[in-house]
Amino acid sequence: MPNFETVHLSLLVLIGPVCSTAYDGKRVNALVESLLNQGFSVALDFQGVKLVTPTFYTASVGSLQSTRSREFAQGLITVSDLYLL
């Protein structure tokens, strides 16, 4: 039975102040997928990140939104402090 305990992931700690590559985005995506499959909810925190490129966003958050839309709607995946221009 899933426990839905929330795991907070700081993108500043995981990737750094610049989130720019598809490789790093796919790493974040794989980590989130793994945590969801283990029954956790995930909070992606972009606080302190200075730059997020479309390439990174698509490979990480964008990909999750298209494959896990139900989890976003249920609040099992949340994103904070992400500002796209």
Image (cartoon, grey):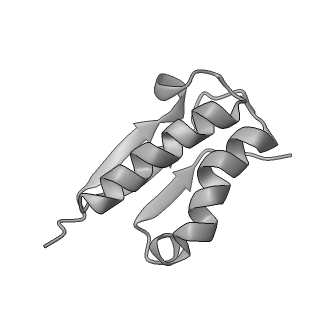
**31 and 42: which one is in front?**
31
Q: In the figure, residue 15 lies in which quadrant?
A: top right
Q: Residue at x 47, y 24 (%)?
A: 13
Q: Where does the image place residue 29, in percent across and percent down from the top left?
A: 51, 47
Question: Going by the picture, which residue comes out furthest to the right?
Answer: 85
Residue 26 visible in this rendered orientation of the protein: yes
Q: Where does the image place residue 70, in percent across and percent down from the top left?
A: 49, 78
Q: Residue at x 51, y 41 (%)?
A: 28
Q: Residue at x 60, y 27 (%)?
A: 48
Q: In the figure, residue 51 lies in which quadrant?
A: top right
Q: Is residue 79 left or right of residue 7?
A: right
Give the number of marks: 0
| Quarter of the figure with the N terminus | bottom left
**From the viewer's perspective, is residue 45 above or below residue 41?**
above
Residue 45 visible in this rendered orientation of the protein: no
Question: Going by the picture, which residue comes out furthest to the left?
Answer: 1
Q: Where does the image place residue 71, in percent across and percent down from the top left?
A: 45, 72
Q: In the figure, residue 23 lies in which quadrant?
A: top right
Q: Is residue 45 left or right of residue 23?
A: left
**48 and 30: which one is in front?**
30
**47 and 32: which one is in front?**
32
Q: Is residue 35 left or right of residue 67?
A: left
Q: Is residue 15 left or right of residue 41?
A: right
**From the viewer's perspective, is residue 51 above or below residue 66?**
above
Q: Residue at x 34, y 51 (%)?
A: 34
